Amino acid sequence: MELYPAVDIEGGRVVRAPPHGPLVQPLAALAAFTRAGARWIHLVDMDRAYGRQDNHELISAVLKAAQIRVQVGGGLFREGDIDQAFTLGATRVVIGARGAVDDGLVARLVSRHGAARLAVGIDAKGGRVAPRGGGGGGTAELLELTAQELATRVARLGIRTIIYNEVTRDGQLAGPDIAGATELAALGLDVIVSGGVGSLDDLRAARVAGLAGACVGRALYDGKFTVAEALACLS
């Protein structure tokens, strides 16, 4: 099972840093996670995800500086933007749900880049797909599609990796939706759970469930545990 320390960028800084602590710059977060032994980072442009001006230059700078593998997401549902993320140096790109519902787009991307270099991001609420920024005021709009239905659909097109996040748990440190992630893994997919990891016990539960990985943001920035402790837990 793999650890994916999250570097979520909003307004030029890391979103999940402690609210009353110093601002954390994305390049500093990358360097710290690299020194700590992380093998991947999960890099997300939150501004792009919510339909605001993107952080293209900063994302590019992080990718250029990275000496570890980088999984890039955040509002990537246009073919050109996904291709560009690879050009900039992404190891794996996460296709947002708004792109993943386009069978032709997914099929072309799998053919061009290979299944190992792509994932589909499924943000869900109550089992239904809820892409970030879909509704007004930055809220998520529920689609007439369940997480399992979307996962089944993209699996038929060759996708092997899903990033699954129950949006109500995101940043809450109360535990990720292991049950929901496990249902998707039962389809034969590699599922990386995201949202809500707050303790090493949460990581142990994800490992026991047979999940492929976990994205961890706030818990690392808040010092709930270290990268080294997480890696030891998952090894």
Image (spheres, rainbow, N blue to C red):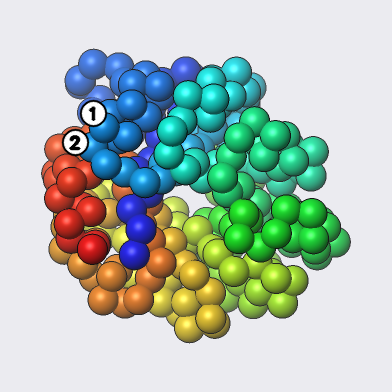
In this picture, is 230 found above or below 126? Answer: above
Q: Quadrant of the C terminus?
A: bottom left
Q: Nearer the viewer, residue 187 or 15?
A: 187
Q: Nearer the viewer, residue 11 or 80?
A: 80
Q: Which residue is mark 1?
A: 18
Local crowd size for mark 1, using a 10 Å CA cut-off: few (<14), some (14–19), many (≥20):
some
In this picture, is 52 found above or below 84? Answer: above
Asked if disc 1 and disc 2 are in contact, CB closer than 8 Å, the reply is yes
Classify mark 2: helix, strand or loop.
loop
Q: Which quadrant holds residue 225?
A: top left
Q: Which residue is mark 2?
A: 222
Give the x, y percent position of residue 106: 76, 60
Question: Is residue 44 at all visible to an observer of this figure?
Answer: yes
* Residue kind at label 1, given as amino acid type: Pro
Give the x, y percent position of residue 103: 80, 64
Q: Which mark is residue 161?
A: none
* Residue kind at label 2, given as amino acid type: Asp
Q: Nearer the viewer, residue 27 or 216?
A: 27
Question: Is residue 55 at all visible to an observer of this figure?
Answer: no
Local crowd size for mark 2, using a 10 Å CA cut-off: few (<14), some (14–19), many (≥20):
some
Q: CA distance from mark 1 to mark 2?
A: 6 Å
Q: Is residue 100 left or right of residue 230?
A: right
